[in-house]
Image (cartoon, helix red, strand yellow):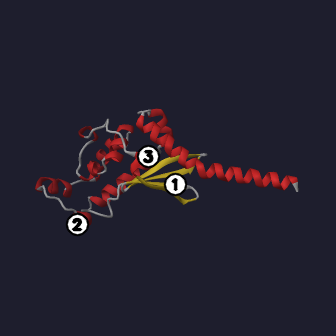
């Protein structure tokens, strides 16, 4: 009977540690982003997965179907957006999927919609983490954080949580 209690206690402690771990990992991600610690950020971000998720969103956003709903007031920008090719989208994504670009993207997600480069933004501008709307599990291995419409998705793999998707909400509201 004593053995069963110890096993149950160990299981409860492990479950609690697992439940707290994404919050700790998210906090470590914010610290790494705030301090420009490239090595720590690289350990907490799956850059190839983030790159692919942004590419898919931008291809959909700049597709002909998406362009009909996109309110563009500048005629030159409208022509440019209609002529965007996957190579140009790759250039945009590569500019943002860096430690500095990631901070700029999280700080101002409209920059991608307006086709601004990270260099045109205030890179030193800190992310206001007090504007996090929610942070919770969406599945046993996925943890989501909503920061004013920008959704950061962390996935548990290799005994750690890593950012693997940044959802800018491009497919929802195009106003």
Counting from the top left corner in percent of width and height, residue 63 is at 27, 61
Look at the picture and state if 37 lies above or below 46: above
Which residue is label 2 attached to?
Answer: 69
Query: Few, some or many C-alpha atoms within 10 Å of disc 3 (few <14, some 14-19, many ≥20)?
Result: few
The numbered mark at residue 15 is none
- Residue at the spot 30% in from the left edge and 37% down from the top edge: 123
3 or 1: mark nearer the eye: 1
Instruction: Pick whichever of labels 1 and 2 is earlier in the sequence.
Output: 2
Which residue is label 3 attached to?
Answer: 48
The numbered mark at residue 143 is 1
Instruction: Please report contact status of discs 3 and 1: CB closer than 8 Å, yes or no.
Output: no
Q: Nearer the viewer, residue 148 or 115?
A: 148
What quarter of the picture does the C terminus occupy? bottom left
Instruction: Pick whichever of labels 3 and 2 is earlier in the sequence.
Output: 3
Counting from the top left corner in percent of width and height, residue 71 is at 19, 62
Q: Secondary structure at mark 3?
A: helix
Cα distance, mark 3 to mark 2? 29 Å
Cα distance, mark 1 to mark 2? 31 Å
- Residue at the spot 35% in from the left edge and 39% down from the top edge: 126
Counting from the top left corner in percent of width and height, residue 23 is at 54, 48
Position of residue 114 in the picture relative to residue 17 (left or right): left
Q: Nearer the viewer, residue 132 or 33?
A: 132
Q: Secondary structure at mark 2?
A: helix
- Residue at the spot 46% in from the left edge and 50% down from the top edge: 164
1 or 2: mark nearer the eye: 1
């Amino acid at each position: 009977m004593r053995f069963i209690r110890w096993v149950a206690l160990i299981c409860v402690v492990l479950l609690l540690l697992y439940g707290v771990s994404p919050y700790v990992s998210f906090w470590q991600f914010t610290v790494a982003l705030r301090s420009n610690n490239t090595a720590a950020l690289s350990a907490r971000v799956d850059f190839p997965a983030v790159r692919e998720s942004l590419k898919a969103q931008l291809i959909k956003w700049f597709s002909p179907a998406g362009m009909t709903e996109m309110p563009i007031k500048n005629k030159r920008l409208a022509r440019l957006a209609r002529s965007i090719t996957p190579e140009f989208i790759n250039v945009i994504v590569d500019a943002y999927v860096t430690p500095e670009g990631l901070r700029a993207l999280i700080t101002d997600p409209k920059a991608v919609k307006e086709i601004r480069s990270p260099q045109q933004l205030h890179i030193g501008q800190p992310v206001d983490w007090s504007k996090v709307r929610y942070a919770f599990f969406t599945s046993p291995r996925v943890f989501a954080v909503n920061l004013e419409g920008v959704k950061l998705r962390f996935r548990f793999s290799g005994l750690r949580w890593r950012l693997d998707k940044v959802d800018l909400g491009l497919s929802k509201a195009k106003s």
